[in-house]
Image (cartoon, rainbow, N blue to C red):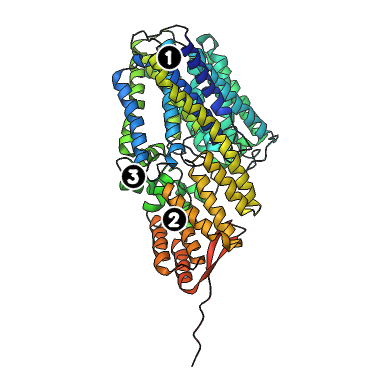
Amino acid sequence: MSVRRTAPADWLLAGAMATALAGVPAVFWPALYDDFTLPKQALLAASGGLTAAAVLWGGWRRTMPGWLQGVLGGWLAVVVAAAAAGLDWRGSVFGYYQYRQGIVTQFACAGLFAGGWALAASGRWRVFGAGFAGLAAAFAYTAVQAAGKDPFDWWIDTSDRAIGTIGNANELAAFAVISMGLVAFVPARRFAAGAAATWAAALFIVLEAESRSGLAAVLVFFVLVPVARWIAGEPGRPLLRAAPVIGLALGAVTVASLAAGGLEGTAARVSGQATRAETGGSTRLALWEGTLHVIAARPVLGTGPDGLHLGFPRWRPAHLGGAYEEYDLVAQSSHNSVLDTAANTGLVGLALLVALVGGCAAASIRAVRRARGRPGPDWPYAWAAMAAYGALTLLNPISLAAHALFFAMLGAMGAAAMARPVQPRPGSWGLLAGMPAAAAGVVIAIALPTADLRAQAGWDAFAGGEFSRAAERYQAAARINPFERDYARRETVALVAAASVDPGRLPDAERALRQFDRRFGFEAGDAFNLAAVLVAMGRPAEEVLPVVQRAVALNPHGVATAWYAGQLIQAVHDGGVLVFDDTDRWTYIVPLPSIAPEGP
């Protein structure tokens, strides 16, 4: 079913969706503290909110089957309930720093799902062409990095391993993989050129990212394409006719990557010339094992959106392998989307998300098989790309840009199969219902980078040893965004460091830590910091020891947990001083030596 019309709501829908598809993959801002993920979340929030408003205003909700509305609404309700019942509801609003899979992101993805649905129901397939602009931006910057001409100084050598416009090599590869499905929207007469350019750009990105899992996902895609076309009952002749052009394009970018060094690096990583932890996959296995324990501890609603990093150290088993043998790696993701979803929103959230994706996929397969030869997108290419991307998310964290495109394609795929044959009518009630979403998205898009600029000033001040100024900058960032856990935590860290230089700041550090605990809740490191401050202030053992015990309970199997708890307990009895370590940039208590009693 396709309803063509022109109304203000439809223009808003097309503009918001085009902004999301082209802008989210491309945007980054080096001046920010969170330079890649935060600007993407900001733009995703704005475009998702405006898209949701356009869908409600345009009446496109009426074209969606009731059961699907129930599943989508139920999933969003579980996301909110999981946050409310989770370990840190405030932090779940935007999510964990540099990952940002909080409530805002989930609602924005749902908005893009609805937007993709409305575009498909109205037959506006050309808007998906904006996705090619996003891929082109990622490809262009990856090529700049591969040539060693990156104008920005990142934390890694991007000429050795590209991070593109996404900010992470494996997540860059994930975006390239899902972008391969955009070929579904290429007109048949331009298929050869469109497929050659799209798939060649994706392959080049993956090779320069030196992502083994990304390369495997590309191979999975090419294996699944003929399988998907066979399932759809569509002929393979168009693909065979385009094969020479596609082959030449893939060969050309492979040679280009070889010249730039990316292919050589990818081959080295595939053959096993990587770090010990990566080679054996032991860190991933440790993350999976620990996450399963988190799910077992909170099976219904999980730890809350992006709450895994809080639950993992509490419930992980002892003797994890990989990186956990040497230090306490922050488990922002289990590197498995199924485990992440179950850990963050519980088995209920996982079941509803599976129902949403599976229901749309099954309906699309049935509809395509029934309607062979009809005009419209060539969905088997999208099926193959979405399946390959899904397989990739079983090994890597979810990326905002890739997931946004996935949900937009999922909504369009579902609508092409299930949209109800009713005439949507724009209405004032829909406009009123959508205005809060649009306003919230725009406000978030402005507030996030505004706060983050102040956080970056705090980071610079801390690096320069200006701890009090750093605390002020982080506090200013937290005033603008009171839901960002990382800003509030870093303010406490800066104040504890300031107290190591000026003991007069100890009361300020204690006050900030206790406020942080009330608002967000402690991790083990926060509780240890409070215990250290209390020791430095000369507080009695009955006040300090419960805080130490709480810190141990929050990370009982940490590499240094038992040792540092012992240091604090000794300092409670013998006294201690705060010391700032310039190398590791953390503040800790050093017990004073015991004074032996004098003889008679």
Task: Report x, y in % for residue 491.
Answer: 54, 50
Task: Report x, y in % for residue 175.
Answer: 52, 30
Location of the N terminus (image quadrant): top left
Q: Is residue 559 above or below residue 150?
A: below
Give the total number of marks visible in the rendering.
3
Q: Residue furthest bottom?
A: 600
Q: Give neighbour class at mark 2: few <14, some 14-19, many 20+ (Cα, 10 Å).
A: many
Of 152 and 539, nearer the camera is 539
Q: Earlier in the sequence, mark 1 or mark 2?
A: 1
Instruction: Tell me the element at label 1.
Output: helix
Left or right of residue 571: residue 466: right
Residue annotated with mark 2: 524
Task: Tell me the CA gap for discs 1 and 2.
Answer: 49 Å
Left or right of residue 207: residue 122: left
Query: Which numbered circle lies on residue 295?
Result: 3
Q: Is residue 279 above or below residue 142?
A: below
Q: Earlier in the sequence, mark 1 or mark 3?
A: 1
Identity of the residue drawn at 51% across and 11% down: 187
Using the rendered image of the protein, determine whether residue 234 is visible from the camera's viewpoint: no
The quadrant where residue 71 appears: top left
Q: Give neighbour class at mark 3: few <14, some 14-19, many 20+ (Cα, 10 Å).
A: many
Residue annotated with mark 1: 120
Tell me whether the residue at label 1 lies in contact with that at label 3, contact meaning CB atoms closer than 8 angstroms: no
Identity of the residue drawn at 34% across and 14% down: 62
Residue type at mark 3?
Answer: Ile
Left or right of residue 169: residue 282: left
Q: Earlier in the sequence, mark 2 or mark 3?
A: 3
Instruction: Tell me the element at label 2.
Output: helix
Of 19 and 547, nearer the camera is 547
Task: Tell me the CA gap for discs 1 and 3.
Answer: 37 Å
Q: Is residue 189 above or below residue 363?
A: above
